[in-house]
């Protein structure tokens, strides 16, 4: 029962943060009309979120085990509740910037704490990968829910859409309450503190960890994945409105299909990874992703403006393009799981700190680049150019597999060495 309650708390925490973090695409769309800002200005919202995530994670991740994982997660959820209240109370573009900075700071702590706690409630790599995929899958359910919650409040005029944040505040508060009543046994983390102390101060240990070839390749892959995912996810509502000419409410709802496909892909990944080797599966996923971009985006050409009033009028591209989420979904949780499983438990918090830092930088980079391409070229070109980081990511997966094999071989040699040598 205690283990189940903690897992439920971790899942709901991730659902709450998914809804908060991925509202940025909707807020960008609404800010352009409600607050009269340009696309370039609106794209900075991703930076306020992700740069804050990167900075806070870099400064605090290595110390979370000493602070206490549960204590840190409780503080992050409390900050997220406060961030939800800021939006409807202040109701301005500057308030949106403050909101995403607060959410970013909270998530920087929450992600490290959640992933570190996964190791506390699982006993082997397969169970770790399964729970990781479940939590990441529920994250995408949160993303999907966010689109529909916001679309229910969108009004062609006024700021009624800000009232959606009261719903998000309630969900985040429920996650906080559930965590407060959950029992967390952190003895496994504290048992490793003596060994970790021998490696130096936590901050220095994280920097040393980042210098390892395996970790360098891993964080590069994480950076590229988030660049692709956030570039598409953040700007998909705007793509739907400006390229496919859907009404604002339908543009947000149609973008939820991408989140739904990501959720389906991550739930399916848990079953697939239990039966097949991760490397060929992820390569197939990237090949399917590239094929869908090349085949579906041409269908967005020539869609007439002003004739779409309901889902029957929507172009086929509005339904097919989000399907790339199914192909994209397994990559992130899989590379995290295989890398964490290759590292000792005491290095999981600092490793996740590095993941959060470079994922945040990837998200900001993807949003800014895609926003610039939207402003200076067009939406179809912006999304077609996602083929470039996709190809680089495929090369990164090859290097990651090679580094993991080398780490496994080195561990096997050490295990086989006679005691005392």
Image (cartoon, rainbow, N blue to C red):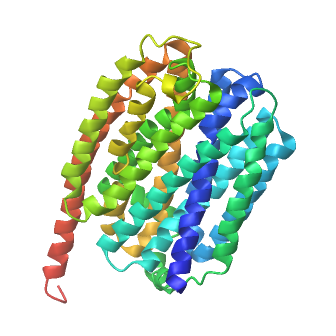
- Whether 51 is drawn above or below 186: the answer is above
- Whether 60 is drawn above or below 265: the answer is below
Work out whether residue 349 or residue 137 is closer to the camera in this orientation and state it.
Answer: 137
Work out whether residue 343 or residue 125 is closer to the camera in this orientation and state it.
Answer: 125
- Whether 419 is drawn above or below 385: the answer is below
Most extreme residue toward the front is: 312
Q: Residue 290, how many percent across, how many down?
A: 29, 32
**In the image, what residue occupies the spot 46% across and 40% down?**
258
- Whether 251 is drawn above or below 161: the answer is above
Q: Residue 201, how many percent across, how many down?
A: 53, 69
Residue 74 visible (yes or no): yes
Q: Residue 279, how many percent across, how many down?
A: 21, 52
**In the image, what residue occupies the spot 54% across and 72% down?**
8
Give the side of residue 5 with respect to residue 411, left or right.
Answer: right
Most extreme residue toward the right is: 89
Q: Residue 123, how many percent across, how many down?
A: 36, 80
Give the side of residue 73 with respect to residue 272, left or right.
Answer: right
């Amino acid at each position: 029962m205690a283990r189940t309650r903690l897992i439920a708390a971790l899942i709901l925490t991730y659902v709450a943060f998914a809804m908060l973090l991925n509202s940025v695409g909707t807020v960008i769309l609404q800010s352009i009309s409600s607050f009269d800002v340009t696309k370039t200005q609106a794209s900075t919202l991703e930076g306020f979120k992700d740069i804050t995530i990167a900075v806070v994670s870099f400064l605090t991740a290595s110390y979370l085990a000493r602070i206490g994982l549960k204590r840190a997660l409780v503080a992050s959820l409390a900050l997220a509740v406060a961030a939800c209240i800021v939006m409807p109370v202040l109701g301005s573009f500057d308030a949106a910037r403050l909101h995403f900075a607060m959410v970013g700071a909270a998530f920087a702590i929450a992600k490290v704490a959640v992933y570190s706690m996964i190791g506390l409630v699982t006993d082997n790599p397969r169970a770790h990968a399964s729970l990781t995929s479940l939590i990441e899958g529920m994250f995408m359910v949160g993303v999907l829910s966010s689109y529909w919650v916001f679309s229910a409040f969108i009004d062609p005029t006024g700021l009624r859409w800000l009232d959606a944040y009261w719903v998000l505040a309630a969900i985040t508060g429920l996650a906080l309450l559930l965590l407060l009543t959950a029992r967390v046994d952190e003895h496994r983390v504290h048992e490793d503190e003596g060994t970790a102390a021998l490696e130096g101060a936590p901050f220095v240990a994280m920097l040393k960890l980042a210098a390892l070839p395996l970790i360098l390749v891993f964080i590069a892959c994480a950076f590229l994945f988030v660049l692709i995912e956030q570039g598409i996810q953040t700007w998909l509502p705007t793509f739907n409105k400006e390229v496919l000419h859907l009404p604002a409410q339908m543009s947000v709802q149609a973008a939820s299909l991408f989140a739904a496909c990501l959720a389906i892909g991550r739930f399916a990944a848990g079953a697939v990874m239990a039966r097949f080797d991760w490397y060929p599966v992820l390569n197939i996923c990237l090949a399917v992703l590239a094929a869908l971009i090349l085949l579906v985006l041409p269908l967005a050409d020539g869609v007439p403006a002003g004739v779409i009033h309901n889902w029957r009028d929507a172009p086929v591209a509005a339904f097919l393009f989000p399907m790339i989420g199914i192909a994209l979904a397994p990559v992130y949780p899989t590379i995290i799981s295989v890398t964490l499983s290759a590292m000792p438990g005491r290095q999981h918090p600092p490793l996740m700190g590095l993941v959060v830092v470079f994922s945040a930088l990837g998200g900001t980079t993807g949003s800014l680049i895609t926003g610039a391409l939207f402003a200076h070229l067009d939406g179809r070109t912006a999304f077609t150019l996602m083929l470039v980081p996709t190809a680089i990511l495929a090369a990164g997966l090859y290097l990651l597999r090679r580094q993991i094999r080398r780490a496994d071989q080195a561990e096997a040699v050490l295990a086989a060495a006679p005691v005392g040598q």
